Image: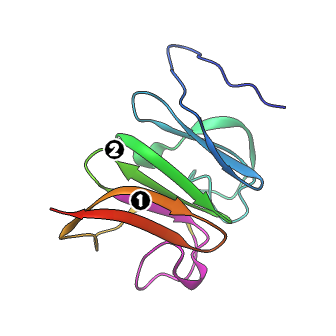
Amino acid sequence: MLSVTESKGVSVHPWVTHGCFSHLSSASGQCYTFGSNQHGQLGTNSCRNSRVPHLVVGLRAMKVTVVACGDAFTVAIGADGEVCTWGKGARGRLGRKDEETGMPRPVQLEETHPYVVTSVACCHGNTLLAVKRE
């Protein structure tokens, strides 16, 4: 069993988990990941597993408001509607037209205009984005 508490001034929000990996976000909008990383779903630019939470460095410039994960992939939404995806890319999971292979680090989607993404839900191999028109 894992217990996550406030540490070093970091206030932790409830986290999301899918199978063998987890993501949590702080009140300041930082994203942390830990667990299985076979497809790069932790966003650490490697495929090494982690037993302790690590900051997702590729999201430093974004205030993360929502994180969702499916089987071996992750989607993060920023306060300004930015969308970043990473992990297993098979069959369009990551939302990129030209990317079927995995991505071990967060990459921002550019295809969301003229909409602002407000929320996300993921399941096994699917991603659903809730949007509003800009």
- Would you say 100 lies left or right of 62 here? right
Q: Main secondary structure of the magenta part?
A: loop
Q: Quadrant of the N terminus?
A: top right
> Which range of residues does the magenta coloring cover?
83-102
The type of colouring in the image is rainbow
Look at 41% across and 65% down and name the residue there: 129
The residue that label 2 is drawn on is 62
Which residue is at the front of the view, 125 or 50? 125
Q: Is residue 113 left or right of residue 124?
A: left
**Residue 15 visible at all:** yes
User: Does 93 lie within the magenta span?
Assistant: yes
Task: Estimate the spatial distance between the alpha carbons at disc 2 and disc 1, rounded to whole Å.
Answer: 9 Å
Residue designated by label 1 = 84
Q: Residue 80, how many percent across, how many down?
A: 25, 48
Total label count? 2
Farthest residue to the left: give it: 134
